Image (tube, rainbow, N blue to C red):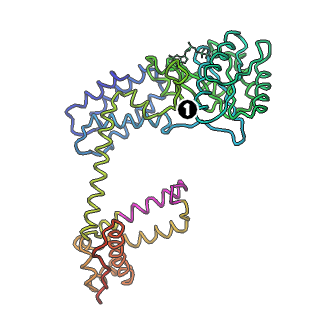
Amino acid sequence: LTSGLESAWNKLKGEEVLTKENIVEPMRDIRRALLEADVSLPVVRRFVQAVSEQAVGVGVIRGVKPDQQLVKIVSDELVKLMGGEVSELTFAKSPPTVILLAGLQGVGKTTVSAKLALYLKKQGKSCMLIAGDVYRPAAIDQLVILGKQVDVPVYTAGTDVKPAEIARQGLQEAKKKNVDVVIMDTAGRLQIDKTMMDELKDVKRTLNPTEVLLVVDAMTGQEAAALVTTFNLEIGITGAILTKLDGDSRGGAALSVKEVSGKPIKLVGRGERMEDLEPFYPDRMAGRILGMGDVLSFVEKAQEVMKQEDAEDLQQKIMSAKFDFNDFLKQTRAVAQMGSMSRVLGMIPGMGKVTPAQIREAEKSLQIMEAMIEVMTPEEREKPELLAESPARRKRIAKESGKTEQQVSQLVAQLFQMRVRMKNLMGVMQGGSVPALSN
Ligand code: GDP
Ligand code: MG
């Protein structure tokens, strides 16, 4: 995947900006690279479309070359594709939390069972394992041995008892022992078949699990998409665990899971040791896939600098009391935007208590302010003092904007108040008073 993408970036060397035309070739390379990495076709299509749309609309960042910019866009999109954030395990409100593991044979279910127990133990949770693979006596022994290694009790009932019955007994035992988390290992087949699915359904019905995690071998490639879809439709999963990421898998499985099932990858196994289980970080995975961590952090820094320069610019204006109507407009608009966002999301931290009425009010007063600022001359916008000194100017603005003189005076006063307030905010206490408007 990495080498295929390499040629995509190379095609942009020497270009000044990303355009509709010059991204055609690189996008073709990206598409091919993803397909070669075993990402399923519909996922690739949507991905390429999303990246192309963003690439054409992106603004130039000083010092960042178009190929670097495209790397960043692809990376961001990859992260999004994989679910964006880390998805934590869910725990039951009242213990025990029940985790059911499912998956094909040899993918690493039994290993993951014990790894997961150790992982949770490190978080201070007591665990119990249930040996549910009744088809191979060796499978039960394997889990017992691994259980000893991580020092977690294993419930076994031999190979003559049906998995759903083992599940019932195991759960009872877990409740008796007051453990926090029960993890049930199950039998897999080489291929999806009805008996396995029926058994899993029975077990699921018995356990009523908090998490049903599909264990997927990272080497599965293309088929991962179909596998995840089928398991999700048949038994309903809450997430996936991707194993054997330490091997030379091509990453396709990681990219398809979330997109085809809507269920996140929650954990990854990257080795045979019991310690080798970790949360799934979409951003790290994207970095691994692209193999261009240095470019990414460079672009991020450049973006940061841009933002900072903007902020510094504003800060300097405030310090030198140059904060004018143009800045005022920028500021209030930013605040208003946050307002309408909070209406949509209803949950921006710290803005939770904004009521719809308050937002409507703010939007209305912003409209009034905008109308007045619009009819100011550029000079008046940059030098609010002109308005403070001249009633004639305020009168003209009132007339042209269809507002009252009082509203104009209020706006001018507000700007000076804002200067003072911001100065104070920045810890610059000297100077800055609200001038009385001359009549
Ligand atoms: P199950 O049939 O799904 O229960 O699979 P097992 O847990 O028995 O694992 C099958 C094989 O894969 C074993 O040899 C494990 O040691 C190996 N395995 C499991 N997880 C990983 C992993 O993350 N990395 C590597 N390299 N090997 C693993
Ligand atoms: Mg097993």
Image location of residue 59, percent across then percent down: 29, 46
* Total number of numbered discs in the rendering: 1
Q: In front here: 370 or 68? A: 68
Image location of residue 144, percent across then percent down: 67, 17
Q: Looking at the rendering, which quadrant does residue 400 occupy?
A: bottom left
| Residue 388 drawn above or below residue 111 | below
Image location of residue 40, percent across then percent down: 48, 24
Q: In front here: 115 or 255? A: 115
Image location of residue 384, percent across then percent down: 27, 75
Which segment did they paint magenta?
331-351
Q: Furthest residue to the bottom?
A: 439
| Left or right for 72, reference 82 | left
| Residue visible at 30% across and 90% down in the picture | 439
Q: Amino acid at mark 1?
A: Lys
Image quarter for ligand 1 equals: top right
Q: Which residue is mark 1?
A: 266
Q: Furthest residue to the left?
A: 14
Element under disc 1: strand
Q: Residues within 10 Å of mark 1 (few under 14, many from 20)?
A: many
Q: In front here: 291 or 60? A: 291
Locate the N terminus by quadrant.
Answer: top left
| Residue 101 drawn above or below residue 400 | above
